[in-house]
């Protein structure tokens, strides 16, 4: 590998290599590449021995009775399944809270510094505090009739009650289904119905920057849609008085008006007031469900990814420990929302499993000032900072002056998550946030994987800007061509994995057939990620993006089918096709082609209406940046839309290659001539 790049460089290539600072190796869990290679070899060749050793760090009420690892990845040989430590009994909430207090004496240690949208709004939550609130919430849920296996929908902003609720569900064996508070009523309704959640926990509202969101109103709309669609009603809707409390502090009590259904609606504070502070955990099989989390599907219908108790505990604990080189005095901050898998694994379960102190942030990076992130790092002396390339690119445009106002010397490790980070953003992050001394762990993983699967280990790996480097322990990647043939050496192809790790998803809730067809049918014997990947001459892996019809907007996956379905529901739209277009901040944005019905023109008013319609159906994150009128779409003679051509039109790339299979090649030039020049 070549020496580290010149200090003044602001861009990087595959040949630029950055080495960890020697001092990081002093107390590193994995201090060098040789140690990694030895541990990795053991993890893939002797997984039972490897994971059994890590499992000793946790409490198992009973040991495994079946195979430690049992699985089938080959659909031609029968049903797909994955089982770890089959027969063992445990409780994840007990392991990550109670044991930190009783066995590790961490009761008074801060579990979370909660930082509100307003910089003056903050809390310190110790492990004892956390246990008390979780137990009270668990008792409330039990009193309402929630029992093991029941699904509980959670639609909350980034407030402590979100933590209390998900951990209370885990404590009593209920299955939490958390829905990102930026999703629409339609999206919430779909998720409630799909998993038949009998209970909903939400809040009156919250501030996102200066914008006030009436969350209860959206939740009410969702519950009404549930009744209209399937005549299904939740038994109880618990409402956290979050915004109302803050408006009172601001002497502005009358801004938030919420409706109330006395048959189902209950105030959180009323229920919690007299709830007992002790709740015995429900002892569960390691393969019992822990949570359902929905991710976009290529058919347009979101998939309810199901994770189970034991394997998820083991893997999130291990990845947090090794990837962030966690040490007991670290202050860790992941800026994600718990509504996404990153927040599940690396705000809640992974950090708590290690007895860590975390920052939990309700606000946005640029409110009330563009230096909010750097202010929080300085305030809490954050040592490990884990954020998304989207946030980095957004903050880059304000330059380094806001950064220089703050002391960031506490930082030791930086992290990137959600999408491949472009080299320019990597370099800015490394130079100005990490002061050219903090390794960047660029983590690749998915909702389905439960935890990091390709990632650097900060003290051990030389880094290449933009590369996810090498696989984590127990993960065996391969690159395949379209025919399922494995590609060796330097190559580019489909990224697949040949054997499971503990936290791999177990199924799609209520639809195991879809689970098998989505992830295992294309290449029998492999888990198919849906991502393309390149392996360089040093064996490092570079994620090249989605191969199927998926979009990665601000690090969050959306399916083209989901957006197209929303557009075609509008009476003016006969047909729609959605592709990605590069965006300087989001990474990718939505470029939509719409064929309108007779009598309709794509006026500014209709464009605004279509954007609003997509926001209503899916949420603000899916709002199209570009909408172009398309008198026709480039289709093959069999009627298949040639998305490759649409992507090239959206990006104004004229080298189209072979378009001889198009039924009407002339439509391509028409679309080029009418392409949108500027975003909304």
Image: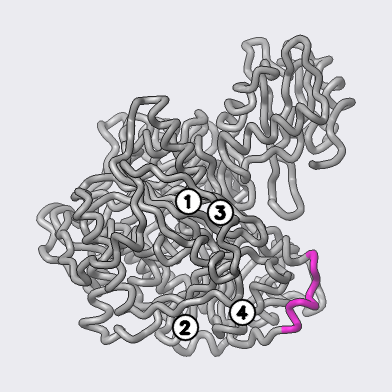
Closer to viewer: mark 4 or mark 2: 2
Is any atom of residue 360 visible in this view?
yes
User: SS for tag 2?
Assistant: loop
| First in sequence: mark 1 vs mark 4 | 4
How far apart marks 1 and 4 lie (CA) works out to 25 Å
How far apart marks 1 and 2 lie (CA) works out to 26 Å
On screen, residue 106 above or below 93: below
Does the magenta segment cover residue 67?
no
Res 446 label: 1
Mark 3: few/some/many CA within 10 Å (<14, 14-19, 20+): some
Closer to viewer: mark 1 or mark 3: 3
* Left or right: 3 in relation to 60: right
How far apart marks 2 and 3 lie (CA) works out to 39 Å
| First in sequence: mark 2 vs mark 3 | 3
Which residue is at a point 75% across and 82% down the rendered structure image?
A: 404
Q: Whole-percent x and y of residue 540?
A: 57, 60
Does the magenta segment cover residue 404?
yes
Q: Do the residues labelled 1 and 2 touch (CB within 8 Å)?
A: no
Residue 167 location, quadrant: bottom left
Residue 442 location, quadrant: bottom right
Q: Whole-percent x and y of residue 402?
A: 76, 77
User: Which span is picked out in magenta?
Assistant: 397-405
Q: Circle 3 sits on which residue?
A: 256
Q: Circle 2 sits on which residue?
A: 330
| First in sequence: mark 1 vs mark 3 | 3
Q: Circle 4 sits on which residue?
A: 438
């Amino acid at each position: 590998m070549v020496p580290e790049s010149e200090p003044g460089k602001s861009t990087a290539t595959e040949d630029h290599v950055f080495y960890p600072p020697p001092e990081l190796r002093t107390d590193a869990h994995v201090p060098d590449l040789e140690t990694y290679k030895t541990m990795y070899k053991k993890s893939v060749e002797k997984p039972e021995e490897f994971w059994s050793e890590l499992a000793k760090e946790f409490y198992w009420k009973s040991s495994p009775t079946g195979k430690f690892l049992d699985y089938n990845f080959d659909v031609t040989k029968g049903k797909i399944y994955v089982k770890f430590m089959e027969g063992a009994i445990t409780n994840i909430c007990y392991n990550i809270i109670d044991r930190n207090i009783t066995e590790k004496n961490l009761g008074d240690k801060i579990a979370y510094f909660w930082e509100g949208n307003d910089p003056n709004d903050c809390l310190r939550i110790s492990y004892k505090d956390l246990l008390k609130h979780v137990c009270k919430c668990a008792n409330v849920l039990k009193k309402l009739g929630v029992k093991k296996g029941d699904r509980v929908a959670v639609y909350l902003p980034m407030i402590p009650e979100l933590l209390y609720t998900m951990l209370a569900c885990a404590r009593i064996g209920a299955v939490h289904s958390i829905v990102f508070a930026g999703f629409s009523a339609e999206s919430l309704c779909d998720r409630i119905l799909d998993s038949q959640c009998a209970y909903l926990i939400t809040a009156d509202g919250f501030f996102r920057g200066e914008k006030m969101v009436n969350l209860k109103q959206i939740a009410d709309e969702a519950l009404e849609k549930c009744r209209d669609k399937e005549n299904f009603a939740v038994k109880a809707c618990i409402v956290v008085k979050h915004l109302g409390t803050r408006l009172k502090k601001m002497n502005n009590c009358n801004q938030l008006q919420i409706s109330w259904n006395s048959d189902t609606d209950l105030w959180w504070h009323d229920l919690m007031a007299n709830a007992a502070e002790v709740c015995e955990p429900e002892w569960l099989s390691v393969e019992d469900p822990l949570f359902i989390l929905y991710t976009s599907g290529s058919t347009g219908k979101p998939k309810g990814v199901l994770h189970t108790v034991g394997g998820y505990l083991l893997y999130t604990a291990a990845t947090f420990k090794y990837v962030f080189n966690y040490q007991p005095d670290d202050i860790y901050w992941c800026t994600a929302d718990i509504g996404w898998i990153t927040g599940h694994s690396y705000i809640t379960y992974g950090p708590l499993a290690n007895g860590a102190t975390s920052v939990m942030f309700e606000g946005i990076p640029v409110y009330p000032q563009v230096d909010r992130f750097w202010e929080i790092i300085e305030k809490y002396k954050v040592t490990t900072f884990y954020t998304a390339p989207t946030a980095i690119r957004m903050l880059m445009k304000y330059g380094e002056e806001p950064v220089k106002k703050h002391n960031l010397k506490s930082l030791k490790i930086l992290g990137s998550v959600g999408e491949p980070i472009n080299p320019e953003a990597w370099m800015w992050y490394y130079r100005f946030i990490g002061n050219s001394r903090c390794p960047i762990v660029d983590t690749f993983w998915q909702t389905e994987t439960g935890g990091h699967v390709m990632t650097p280990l900060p003290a051990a790996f030389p880094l290449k800007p933009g590369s996810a480097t090498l696989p984590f322990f127990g993960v065996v990647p391969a690159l395949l061509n379209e025919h399922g043939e494995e590609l060796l050496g330097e190559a580019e192809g489909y990224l697949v994995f040949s054997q499971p790790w503990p936290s791999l998803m177990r199924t799609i809730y209520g639809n195991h057939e879809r689970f098998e067809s989505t992830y295992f049918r294309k290449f029998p014997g492999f888990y198919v990620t849906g991502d393309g990947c390149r392996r360089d001459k040093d064996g490092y892996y570079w994620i090249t993006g989605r191969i199927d019809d998926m979009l990665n907007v601000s690090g969050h996956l959306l399916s083209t089918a989901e957006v197209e379905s929303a557009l075609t529901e509008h009476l003016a739209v006969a047909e729609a096709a959605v592709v990605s277009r590069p965006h300087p901040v989001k990474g990718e944005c939505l470029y939509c082609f719409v064929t309108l019905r007779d009598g309709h023109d794509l006026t500014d008013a209709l464009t605004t209406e279509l954007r609003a319609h997509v926001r209503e159906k899916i949420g603000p994150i899916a709002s199209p940046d570009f909408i172009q009128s398309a008198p026709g779409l480039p289709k093959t003679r069999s009627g298949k839309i040639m998305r490759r051509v649409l992507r090239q039109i959206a990006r104004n790339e004229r080298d189209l290659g072979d378009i001889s299979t198009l039924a009407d090649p002339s439509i391509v030039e028409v679309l080029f001539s009418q392409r949108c020049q500027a975003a909304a």
